Image (cartoon, rainbow, N blue to C red):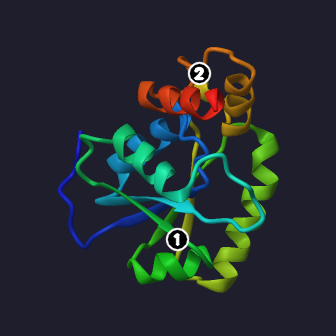
């Protein structure tokens, strides 16, 4: 169910998405039901060495959310709140899988609020069948030849297979 895109309620859903998982897609889809526009944004983090390039991650996410009209996919480098302000976003969407995520996410939300008080952080929990799932686990399963078909969209599974064949 898509809402018409307007200049209304815009949210940013940031992450490294290396790779995008079914849990990420679930959060993005539900955010799209709450906001007029959701920008799923690949963060370029100089402290991480991702398996996939930024462009590859943008492409995989785009394919994963195809058909959800009010989702846009982009990438950014720098402060998230600056990017959000530039895109006229009023909210940052973050997924919380478990209590262990909360402390870090809470700290980031408070820091972002200090930097830009006009941008709120909204926490969404993925469907319970995805609460244990993260990109690191998916990469490790794929690296050792395990089947990640239940954890990622089919095209992402194929991209993982390609990466680990080489």
Q: Residue at x 57, y 24 (%)?
A: 151
Residue with the mark numbered 2: 129
Mark nearer the N terminus (2 vs 1): 1
Q: Nearer the viewer, mark 2 or mark 1?
A: 1
Q: Residue at x 24, y 73 (%)?
A: 7
Estimate the x, y position of residue 89 in percent, counting from the top left: 42, 73
Q: Is residue 74 left or right of residue 165?
A: left
Q: Which mark is residue 6?
A: none
Estimate the x, y position of residue 115 in percent, counting from the top left: 66, 85
Q: Residue at x 43, y 45 (%)?
A: 61
- Element assignment for label 1: strand
The front one of 31 and 68 is: 68
**Quadrant for the C terminus in the image:** top right
- Vertical comparison of 2 with 160: above or below: below
The Cα–Cα distance between marks 2 and 1, rounded to whole angstroms, is 30 Å
- Vertical comparison of 161 with 149: above or below: below
Considering every residue shown, the one lying at the far left of the view is 4
Residue with the mark numbered 1: 76
Evaluate if marks 2 and 1 touch, with contact meaning CB atoms under 8 Å apart: no
Where, by quadrant of the figure, is residue 130 drawn?
top right
Where, by quadrant of the figure, is residue 44 drawn?
bottom right
Crowding at dot 1, Cα within 10 Å, few <14 / some 14-19 / many 20+, comes out as: some
Q: Is residue 93 visible?
A: no
Q: Residue at x 78, y 65 (%)?
A: 47
The front one of 117 and 135 is: 135
- Element assignment for label 2: helix
Estimate the x, y position of residue 121 in percent, counting from the top left: 58, 64
Q: Is residue 104 left or right of residue 39?
A: right
């Amino acid at each position: 169910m898509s809402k018409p895109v307007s200049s209304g309620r815009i949210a940013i859903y940031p992450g490294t998405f290396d790779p995008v998982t079914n849990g990420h897609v679930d959060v993005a889809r539900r955010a799209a039901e709450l906001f007029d526009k959701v920008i799923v944004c690949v963060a370029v983090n100089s402290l991480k060495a991702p398996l996939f390039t930024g462009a590859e991650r943008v492409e995989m996410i785009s394919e994963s959310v195809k058909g959800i009209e009010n989702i846009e996919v982009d990438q950014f480098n720098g402060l998230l709140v600056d990017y959000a302000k530039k895109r006229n976003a009023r909210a940052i969407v973050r997924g919380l899988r478990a209590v262990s995520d909360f402390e870090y996410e809470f700290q980031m939300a408070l820091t972002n609020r200090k930097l830009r008080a006009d941008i709120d952080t909204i926490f969404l929990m993925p469907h319970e069948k995805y609460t244990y799932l993260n990109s690191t686990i998916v990469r490790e399963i794929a690296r050792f030849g395990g089947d990640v078909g239940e954890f990622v969209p089919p095209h992402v599974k194929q991209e993982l297979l390609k990466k680990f064949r080489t």
